[in-house]
Image (tube, helix red, strand yellow):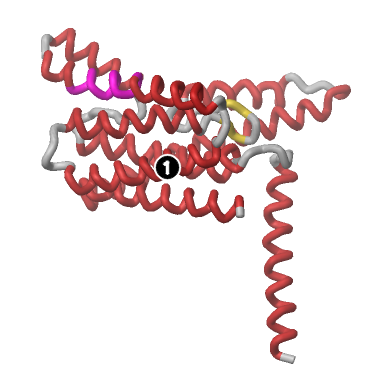
Amino acid sequence: MINKLLKKDDSKKRESKKNIFSFMDKFLNKKKEIHILETIYIASMLSMVCGYVDAYTYITKDGIFAYAQTGNIIFLAMNLAKGNFYGVIDYLFPILSFICGIWFAQFIKKITNGKHIMEWGYIILLINTIIFFMVGLFSKNFPNALMVSSVSFISAVHMSTFNKVEGLSYVSTLCTGNLRSASEHLFNYFFNKNKNKKEENIKSGKNGLIYLTVILSFTFGAYLGSLFTNKFGTKSVWIAAGVLMFVNSFMFFEEV
């Protein structure tokens, strides 16, 4: 009798979980062919990590960004104008490392012919996790430019690998492009309504919300990064490593 009740309770929990995810999938108009790497769950968590780490490196590495190369280029130019060539080198290394990361990712895509994307995603997140752990462990023993460059390299590979959310192109490491896309879709939803194209209007609204979710996740990550870095110092990057481990586990169990 007790076993029957327990089994019934477990089935209700599974059904409840299924209903929640099916509701979210229906809201997002999610199709079965969308890869696990492209789901809003993964995109949000990865964007949060990117915001977190950029805040971390900015605070602990004298204003150098790991992901936001636009910021690094601006600071490089400012240091160049001041004649501070040591400052130029500090910002130049992460930029060059980012370029090498993009080239590396493109080379991998070329030799694999776009296959084994799931396995590649696992590997990238694992390497990313290890680098975060090493940065937290040896942060005080190596120059800032070198430590940030290692993160910039893997961030470029990360950006090339995780570049779709619910079928839409996005960037997990930045907000400008995502903000533009969110603004365009929401404009179409609110101001370009067409009674004959109701489905397109609804789709524009949903797409705008997807981009906003990614942006808010990045913002929340930057907030947490600032909060925990100021409180725990260089080892606070291990929190980001923990989130990536969770994402990797989530992806694995979703695929099983």
Q: Nearer the viewer, residue 215 or 130?
A: 130
Q: Amino acid at mark 1?
A: Leu
28 lies above or below 195? below
Where does the magenta region start and end? 90-99
Say which quarter of the image contains residue 87.
top left
Rendering quarter of residue 170: top right
Q: Position of residue 76 (x, y in %)?
A: 23, 15
Q: Position of residue 121 (x, y in %)?
A: 49, 39
From what the image shows, is residue 98 above or below residue 255? Answer: above
Q: Residue at x 73, y 84 (%)?
A: 5
Q: Which residue corresponds to the image point at 40% horizontal and 22% vertical from the top-left?
A: 102
Residue to which mark 1 is pinned = 125
Left or right: 101 as drawn, with respect to 184:
left
Question: Is 93 colored magenta in this rendering?
Answer: yes
Which residue, as the protein is rendered here, is positioned at the far right? 196
Residue 177 within the magenta-colored segment of the rendering: no
Residue positioned 58% across, 23% down in the render: 181
Residue 83: which quarter of the image? top left
Task: Tell me the element at label 1.
Answer: helix
Residue drawn at x 24%, y 11% as measured from the top left: 77
**Left or right of 195 in this view: 150:** left
Quadrant housing the N terminus: bottom right
Return the residue found at the far front. 111
Where the C terminus falls, by quadrant? Answer: bottom right
Image coordinates of residue 86 in percent, x first then y, are 11, 18
**44 on left or right of 240:** right
